[in-house]
């Protein structure tokens, strides 16, 4: 008979146990993205970037043909990581780029969290490749986008069938916090949620302003 204990499950993410790889959040890639509104995409990319940076998550930022074709990475991401070097590639599959893989190995974490454009190419490629090499893979599905709903949905389905674990941007932030009693990151988490968390963020602003309310108290 199983016995319950007040400890988190091993499948939950923590700031120390994974590497976040942000892939091809660039102008040219976003122009043809139709499965998610551009404003929502930028907002969710900002949310996960500020969450990862604030919690000290290991992160890799990578672009494809930045200078010659695809353009710069979203400012919401590069600002969060305060000038971190971008790894530019020629390969559509990030996992086939030697510089990216050298960084993955240097960081040395067996969990990979992916987000970027497009889901069916630039996320499927590294997801399936990493799983094949024994890594655990998570996908932040609402911080990804594709040329159609069909393309995005089939890509997510394919990755899940291979063993990847889907999640959302807000879920990622709250999973890193996971306990409102962690006062050292409380203001960080609620601050990110207020700015990028949509209606949930508005709720935090309202409760704090009207009643001085605070979660965990």
Image (spheres, rainbow, N blue to C red):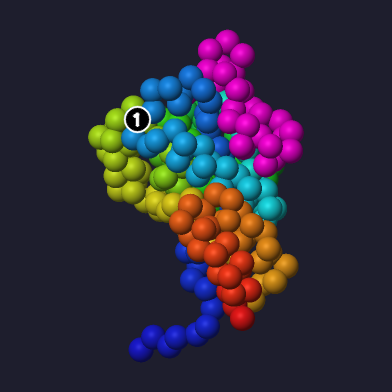
Please tell me how crowded label 1 is: few (under 14), some (14-19), or many (20+) other residues with Cα within 10 Å.
Answer: some
Q: Compared with residue 195, is residue 74 higher up or lower down, i.e. above or below? A: above
Q: Which residue is mark 1?
A: 34
Question: Residue 155 lies in what quarter of the image?
Answer: top left
Task: Work out which residue is located at the far front of the displayed protein and give it.
Answer: 210
Question: Residue 22 lies in what quarter of the image?
Answer: top right
Q: Secondary structure at mark 1?
A: loop
8 or 51, nearer to the observer? 51
Magenta segment boundaries in residue numbering: 64-92
Residue depicted at x 40% and y 35%: 37
Residue 113 in magenta stretch:
no
Position of 186 with respect to 63 (left or right) is right
Residue depicted at x 59% and y 75%: 211
Q: Compared with residue 126, is residue 10 higher up or lower down, i.e. above or below? A: below
Q: Compared with residue 7, is residue 94 higher up or lower down, i.e. above or below? A: above
Residue depicted at x 60% and y 44%: 49
Residue 84 in magenta stretch:
yes
41 or 157, nearer to the observer? 41
């Amino acid at each position: 008979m199983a016995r319950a204990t007040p400890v988190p499950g091993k499948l939950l993410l923590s700031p120390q146990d994974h590497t976040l790889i942000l892939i091809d959040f660039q102008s040219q890639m976003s122009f043809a993205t139709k499965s998610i509104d551009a404003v929502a995409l930028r907002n969710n990319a900002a949310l996960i970037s500020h969450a990862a940076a604030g919690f000290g998550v290991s992160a890799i930022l990578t672009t494809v043909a930045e200078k010659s074709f695809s353009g710069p990475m979203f400012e919401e991401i590069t600002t969060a990581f305060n000038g971190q070097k971008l790894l530019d590639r020629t390969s559509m599959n990030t996992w086939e780029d030697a510089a990216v893989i050298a960084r993955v190995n240097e960081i040395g974490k067996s969990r990979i969290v992916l987000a970027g454009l497009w889901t069916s190419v630039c996320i499927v490629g590294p997801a399936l490749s990493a799983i094949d090499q024994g890594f655990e893979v998570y996908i932040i599905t609402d911080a990804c986008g594709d040329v159609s709903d069909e393309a995005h949905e089939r890509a997510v389905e394919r990755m899940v069938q291979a063993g990847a674990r889907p999640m959302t941007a807000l879920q990622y932030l709250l999973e890193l916090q996971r306990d409102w009693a962690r006062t050292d990151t409380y203001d960080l988490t609620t601050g990110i949620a207020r700015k990028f968390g949509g209606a949930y963020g508005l709720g935090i602003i309202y409760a704090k302003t009207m009643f001085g309310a605070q979660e965990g108290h």
